Image: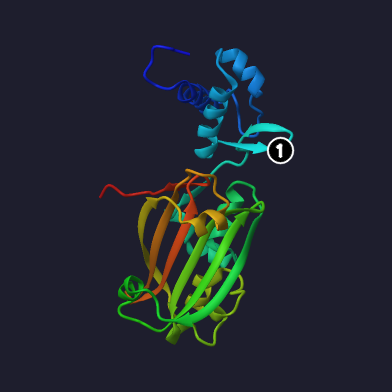
Amino acid sequence: MDASAPEPGFLQIARQLRHEIRSGAYPPGSKLPSETELTRAFGVARMTVRGGIAELRSEGLIVSEQGKGVFVRPRPPVRRLASDRFARRHRDAGQAAFLAEASQVGATPAVDQVQVTSGRPPDSVAGLLGGVTDVVVRSRRYLLDGQPVETAVSYIPKAIAAGTKIADDDTGPGGIYARLEELGHRLDHFVEEVAARMPTQEERFRLQLPAGVPVVTVLRTAYDVHDVPVEVCDTVKSSQSYILEYRVDAT
């Protein structure tokens, strides 16, 4: 601790513990020293230690377990490899993108809060769909090992989706994109808009986010081989659960 530093003591503690977590001194799943041990180690008051712990908790680096202590978040982030996740081989194997990602970290995937409706999309989505204003709307939440990590809302032109498995709660093996290709809309490419922001109160509740943890939003448009937009998907991801990786050719 540097008493002359302009940085408050609790932030100095958070910085030191953050460095030790990221350097591997405290690996994923490991228990941090108790408040009493940290108070002695840093030579500060208990409230200063609690402030440092609260800072790391708000960053999503640690989790508290009632009666057990404070632990480094055990599950590594999902590495979302944009150049691979929508590869046709995954659909051919009956795996939607989320299932393929879950297998990377050995986690058990699940989907809940599925709602399928129809109606008019937001104007911004209608624009991405080439002016289509009558759509099937699929809303759902994704979980890994029981922990919510993402919500998604897909908008598919009703002229394509009505009366098909896309309008059912369970779209079947390979998900929406497998069904679109079965309907003759062979996919060609995707365009994604990525942004970050703080979550709404509803998003914090649905994703069970600690205070101070932002979300990453990905607005994706899927195009078929005729350059026709066939789906827009608006996703909200827990930033503490994902690493977004993109491969860009230098040509």
Instruction: Measuring from the top left, give residue 236's x and y in whole percent.
Output: 46, 58
**Up-down relation of residue 70 to residue 105 (above or below):** above
**Up-down relation of residue 137 to residue 162 (above or below):** above
Q: 174 and 219: which one is in front?
A: 219
Label 1: which secondary element: loop
**Up-down relation of residue 58 to residue 156 (above or below):** above
Instruction: Measuring from the top left, give residue 235's x and y in whole percent.
Output: 46, 61
Residue beneath the point at 53% across and 23% down? 48
The image quadrant of residue 26 is top right
For label 1, the residue is 66
Instruction: Measuring from the top left, give residue 205's x and y in whole percent.
Output: 56, 56
Side (left or right) of 89 relative to 194 = right
The image quadrant of residue 206 is bottom right
**Up-down relation of residue 225 to residue 199 (above or below):** below
Residue beneath the point at 47% across and 61% down? 86
Side (left or right) of 246 relative to 138 = left
Q: 105 and 17: which one is in front?
A: 17
Crowd band around label 1 with a 10 angstrom C-alpha radius: few (<14), some (14–19), many (20+):
few
Residue beneath the point at 55% across and 59% down? 98
Instruction: Measuring from the top left, give residue 174's x and y in whole percent.
Output: 57, 68
